[in-house]
Image (cartoon, rainbow, N blue to C red):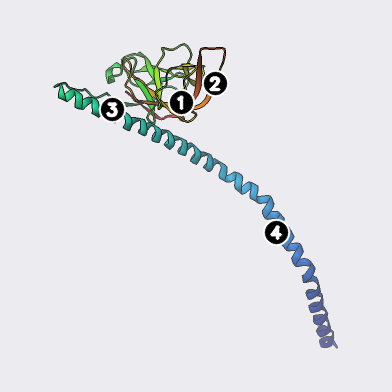
Amino acid sequence: MVLIAATEFAGWFKILQVSTQGFINPVLSFTTAKIQASMDPIFRLSRYPSLAARLSNLEYDYAQSLAKISELERELHEADAIRAALNESSQTKAALFLTTRLVSYTQPGLAAGSDQGVRKGMLVLVAGTAVGTVDHVEESQSTVSLFSETGRHPIIVTTESGVQGVLEGDGRRVHLALVPQGAVLNTGERVVTLGQENISAGVFVGKISNIEVNSASPTKRAQLDQLVSFFSAPVVELK
């Protein structure tokens, strides 16, 4: 009797198992899909920091590429000038490059001074992009005046197409200012130094990101995107 009862129970269990699989399996599949869907945003968020770091690295590399283009154009012009100078038996002296670390991020400063060859007015570069000039020099340290600061000595610059203006800061951003109203500016154009005392020509400053037009003014200005920041740079170059 026990054997018969066990056999009957096994048969009923088999029938019950088969009949419930059609209900349980869809429920399990639905529950698993819901859990995966709820976890996907978490996995995506976990990847955001690395994506932000990659974006920052790409912007840094892009700034270096633009600076390299300006440097190559400058070297081409310098090569032409050198050939002309050699024809006149003249000599050309190369510009000084000096890499140094930052003293402070709160006040723009450098851990190098006159003892290391730093001079007032030298260009300060990050990833080949000019971001300011040396303002005050002591024996072992110096301070920097950034292009974004207000009321600083004007730096003459030019666009790729030859439109000239001066750099102007508003405390946060850098602008190409005093551009004649009739001059043509194009978004994305590179802006480089024109060349003046202590400042070489053809050094990359930024690219035009926004053009501001005031029909009541004889001049206009454009906001520049420098792509890099003095405060995020572990080292800088002086020229």
Amino acid type, label 1: Phe
Can you give x and y, in whole percent of width and height, for residue 237 in the image?
A: 35, 26
Q: Nearer the viewer, residue 177 or 132?
A: 177
Q: Which residue is mark 1?
A: 231
Query: Is the residue under label 3 in contact with that under label 4 (CB below 8 Å)?
Result: no
Q: Nearer the viewer, residue 204 or 187?
A: 187
Q: Earlier in the sequence, mark 2 or mark 1?
A: 2
Q: Is residue 211 left or right of residue 198?
A: right
Q: Residues within 10 Å of mark 4 (few under 14, many from 20)?
A: few
Q: Can residue 233 be seen here?
A: yes
Report, in whole angstroms, how far the alpha carbon at label 2 lies from the one at label 3: 31 Å
Q: Residue 38 or 97: which is nearer the viewer?
A: 97
Q: Give the numbered dot on residue 212.
A: 2
Quarter containing the N terminus: bottom right
Q: Amino acid at mark 3?
A: His
Q: Is residue 179 above or below residue 43?
A: above
- Res 131 seen here: no
